[in-house]
Image (tube, coloured by chain):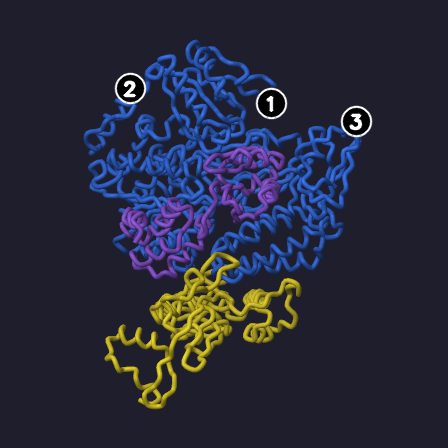
Chain colours: A purple, B yellow, C blue
Amino acid sequence: MNEKVTAIINKYSSDRGQLVSILQDIQAEYRYLPKDALLQVSETMGIPASRVYDVATFFKAFSLKPRGKYVIDVCLGTACHVRGGNRVLETMERCLAIERGQTTKDGKFTLETVNCMGCCAVGPAVKIDGDYYGHMSTDKVDGLLAKFE
Amino acid sequence: MVTINIDGRDLQAQEGQTILQVATENGIDIPTLCHHEAIEPYGACRLCIVEITRGRRTRIVTSCLYPVEEGLKVQTNSLRVMQNRKMLVELLLARCSKNKVIRELASQLGIEQPIIKPEFLEEEDCMVCGLCVRACEQVVGASAISLVNRGITKEPASPFLEPARDCIGCGSCFYICPTNAIKMEDKGDIRYIYNWKVEFKLKKCKVCGNYWAPEKQLEYIRKKWNLPDDFFDICPTCK
Amino acid sequence: MTTKLLNKLSSRQDLEALRKELVRKRKTDKPTISLCNGTACRPYGCLQLTEAFKQGLEVRGLTAKVELRVTGCHGLCEKGPIVVIQPGDIFYQQVKSDDVPEILSETVAKGNVIDRLLHTDPATGRKVVHRNEVPFYLKQQRNILGNNVEINFNKIEDYISIGGYAALARALLEMTPEKIIEEIKSSGLRGRGGAGFPTGAKWESCRHAPGDIKYVIVNADEGDPGAYANEGLLSGNPHSVLEGLIIGAFAVGANQGYVYVRNEYPLALANMVTAIDQAERFGFLGDNILGSGFNFNVRINRGGGAFVCGESTALMASLEGKVGEPRAKYVHTVEKGLWNRPSDLNNVETWANVPLIINKGADSYRTLGTDGSKGTKIFSLVGKINNTGLVEVPMGITLREIIYDIGGGIRDGKKFKAIQTGGPSGGCLPESLLDLPVDFDELSKAGSMMGSGGMIVMDETTCMVDIARYFLSFLEEESCGKCLPCREGIKRMRQVFDEITAGRGSEKDLEFLEQLSLTLVDSSLCGLGQTAPNPVLTTLRYFKDEYEAHIKEKRCPAGVCKALTHYYVIEEKCPGCGICVRECPQEAITFMGKKKPVMMDESKCIKCGICCDVCKMGAIGKR
């Protein structure tokens, strides 16, 4: 039994209704949802493993594979799309040599998409490691990625 | 008791019944795929849709879930229903273009060629009706499998896509699947359910020597109902 | 300034005494710097700017003498970071950290205005000093969102000092649940989440539903891409939503509430957590609120990144720890909702309207709006518009007024083409409908929808076929997958659009799209599938010519669809600087010498658009 996972389950009083929140805390701790953690949740809370797994695979916020050091969120909301957001994504995919949803081989970047973060005024918008970058265009991608060690 | 009208016939119904239940009781045929009388209705396949009229409003609802009420008027085969049903089956056919059950259904509705272009046709057997998952949860109580992922990749699967630990090998999923999408085989003394990557040792009858059910399943039932240790040593045929 | 409370407020008198004290403290001549820290201002570096102000004040020994108020969204996100200085209501925009010393020494200390930081009225070309003179705000009616500027979004004291929780006191101590419901019904308030169901009627049904345990829920899962109206309200003034929720709970008879916040809104989540914590400490939540005998508690749940969880039954499933699959609503959720109990779910903005109605009365509320749609609506006005931001307008204002008078018209001198409302459930309306009043029923009649608040402006460089494809692609990913028509049907529609945008479409495709659309509308299980065809149907209705161009001429008039678009060099404009040559990832452009136009090898071109983006001379064209 993992102590950190136990603590998280207890924080939410082992309440089944809080399953999504519990998984989110586990994901925040480990940067993904380890299988053992999910099995522990299943056993401790008396939820069938299949019903923890289906929740883990349903919600886009969750990853069952370890994520990169930096998670890139490219906004594909309508406002950003209309300003060329998908071309920013394509450029990112080309520069990192991965497709959306994947992680670079060196484990540095995970490329994800998000549908509206609330930065429409500065679209196309990208979020990396919690910081927002606006007015993105295809020619700014290289420079942005180079900022991250 | 309430009176509802289905296809011009006035029928008696009990409060709490669904349109489908009343129709079935009275010999009115409404096609279904994701429905089974032993399982809570789910509303996934939409094939059982009917057109209802309440006052001046008509709408399309699934008969498996819609509760009866006094004065409800139902049409099971109106033009609107038929058009919808046909398109639904076209969607099924596009996904399961080689599946016998789906092809038969399509043929019954007069579909000769799929409306979706050949290069986009797929050859799945599973149409994600969820019966396997629901039977495992509601009838068996094992909840060994679930519908995983979301949207177009949604499918029944075992946790982590590994051998389903909670599976007892009863085969309910295999028996209930309307499109034969579950592959189960008893070979010698082993039962294989390939979809969930599991295999089970079958119990041998002390009398006839036949292998008749997975030991794990029998153990599960024995424990659940507090039966004696040797309860399943003899198969039902010999008993 | 935080007030140290020894005991919770246990009566209306306690609350009013506190309010009096806070108002007194607020009415001093202390200069105030209101600085937007909303999500949309973060990419502009507003957090660093806030730090710069803090340090600037400290260095001058002014920290206690000047109020630095960190607020939520001011509305004109295009010109952020926004800073408003009192006294004088001086409006500064696009403020940088370097501007701080001058602002402190000139404006705060002496009242002098710094010209370069002022907003320019595009009509007159003149600078505008005061916030209420900025054209963007003139036609708005910021009854709800306007309070963002007056409060620090993490200080309940600020909210109380501007009249917060007075409606709650009135509701709990002066009114009965039935009277409250009557008032909400009379006001004509309709749900702001999209469907526009009459709120009073919903509350009444919930109140009358059998059962002792009931729930109230805030739907803050604003998932429409391009809509962040709820975000600006929730993060900027969480207490306004909370106050409405508590009143509603009392009205329907619920003792437990939930706030379901979208996972992608960290600021709104954080501010709501703080607000609930403060409300508990001050006694607005918990047992015997303000001595009324009414008990009520609130939990926050986070979404997991699923648009479908904005649908009420899917949201409730998620609150039960299950996957966000909707269920049939033949039995309404006000009777059997969360945990099969009567549940009243309302949108963030709906809840925020409640204290307003209780304070001012239904009659006063009804003076704004149309016959069928009362009050105001908050929209996120985004896309190819000059004044991108959050606007709050009276129902009945026309789309033209919003786009041109408030929005300042189309950016980059382009021509208006369409306005999209209602998100993926809504539709695209053309120029001919610009005089349509914003009203639930008018928008529905035109084939679109009010939605939760996204208003996306499109111009001549937007391809309407691509937009329809975009929404289908979005919904394909977000579909829960439970029901056949939505799961399979949206994918098949998207495939048809792939063909059309690749130049392989036919007239038969349009027939098929219309047929399949009917099936989705009729037989889908929930609103996501039922409204999925809307973007397709409205673009077919109003922009058929673009479909025909793609199908018959294999041409994309807007120059968006890659397969039908060709990049080329406009020789007369090309100075031969070679920037595009460097940036092209495929080495498809060749440098031909200075002052000579570059040459493009189309066979190598992957249509990434980088050359177009980097060229300062507009020398790369698309056809």
Q: Are marks 1 and 2 in contact (CB under 8 Å)?
A: no
Q: Secondary structure at mark 1?
A: loop
Q: Secondary structure at mark 2?
A: helix
Q: At 32% from the left edge and 87% from the top edge, which residue is drawn? A: B206
Query: Dot 1 corresponds to which residue?
Result: C122
Task: Say above or below: C23 vs C188.
Answer: above
Q: Earlier in the sequence, mark 3 or mark 2?
A: 2
Task: Name the disc covering residue A131, or none.
Answer: none
Task: Say above or below: C574 vs B27.
Answer: above
Query: Dot 2 corresponds to which residue?
Result: C24
Q: Residues within 10 Å of mark 3 (few under 14, many from 20)?
A: few
Q: Earlier in the sequence, mark 1 or mark 3?
A: 1
The picture places residue C255, in percent across and down from the top left corner, at: 26, 46
Query: Dot 3 corresponds to which residue?
Result: C595
Task: Say above or below: C194 vs C365.
Answer: below
How far is mark 1 from mark 3, CA to CA?
Answer: 37 Å
Q: At 45% from the left edge and 62% from the top edge, which residue is drawn? A: B161
How far is mark 1 from mark 2, CA to CA?
Answer: 40 Å
The picture places residue B33, in percent across and down from the top left corner, at: 48, 71
